[in-house]
Amino acid sequence: MRRYARALAGPHGDADDLVQEALARALERRASFRPDMALRPWLLTILHNVFVDGVRRRRAELTRLEVSEAVATALDAPQEHAVRLSEVRARFDALPEDQRAALHLVAIEGLSYQEAAAAIGAPIGTLMSRLGRARAALRAPETVASSGPVRLRLVGGSDDQR
């Protein structure tokens, strides 16, 4: 496993961490190992998948950073637009990880709902639910701002009209 990890990670990669992560994943998923399977190919497949997952994770993070930096530097926007964009970025970063991942895969990476659901390992209905909650969380401050000042209704008070 270590030799294959070195081949995948290259001379500057951290092959030992890759092997450790693969072994941890193999232990977590030992129930999927069948006695009629060969152990070595099964472990090497897990090692390969861990490596690919890491590459994808780093690539998505770099893309996210590049897009964020490009948007921040490429726009010579008026002050209000820059502030609004900063607020949306902060709300996006504050989303729970599952909602942020779903929104990122669909909105930024351009994956279809089916592809995004497969990527995060969730049913398509769960993905759509996460997308709906994430979009609602991003829109929530805009909805309040566009509907004017928020008025609280006092039950039993002067606003109570029967």
Image (cartoon, rainbow, N blue to C red):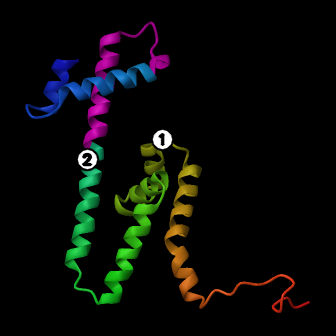
In the image: residue 73, left or right of residue 127: left
Which quadrant holds residue 4? top left
User: Which residue occupies the extreme left position in the image?
Assistant: 11
**Which numbered disc covers residue 121?**
1
In the image: residue 40, left or right of residue 159: left
Above or below — where is 153 with respect to 45? below
In the rendered image, which quarter contains the N terminus? top left
- Amino acid type shown at disc 2: Arg
Which secondary structure is most common in the magenta stretch?
Answer: helix
Helix, strand or loop for disc 2: helix
Q: How crowded is mark 1: few (under 14 residues within 10 Å), some or many (20 or more)?
A: few
Residue at the image point whose x is 52% and y is 60% from the top: 131
Q: Is residue 44 magenta?
A: yes
Residue 8 vs residue 94, the one in the foreground: 94
Camera-side mark, 1 or 2:
2
Magenta-colored span: 29-55
User: Which residue occupies the extreme top position in the image?
Assistant: 35
Q: Position of residue 150 (x, y in %)?
A: 64, 86
Comes first in the chain, label 1 or label 2: 2
Which quadrant holds residue 161? bottom right
Q: Where is residue 130 in the image (x, y as percent from the top left)?
A: 54, 56
How many numbered callouts? Answer: 2
Q: Where is residue 136 in the image (x, y as percent from the top left)?
A: 55, 69
Q: Is residue 126 magenta?
A: no
Q: Position of residue 107 (x, y in %)?
A: 40, 63
- Amino acid type shown at disc 1: Gly
Residue at the spot of label 2? 58
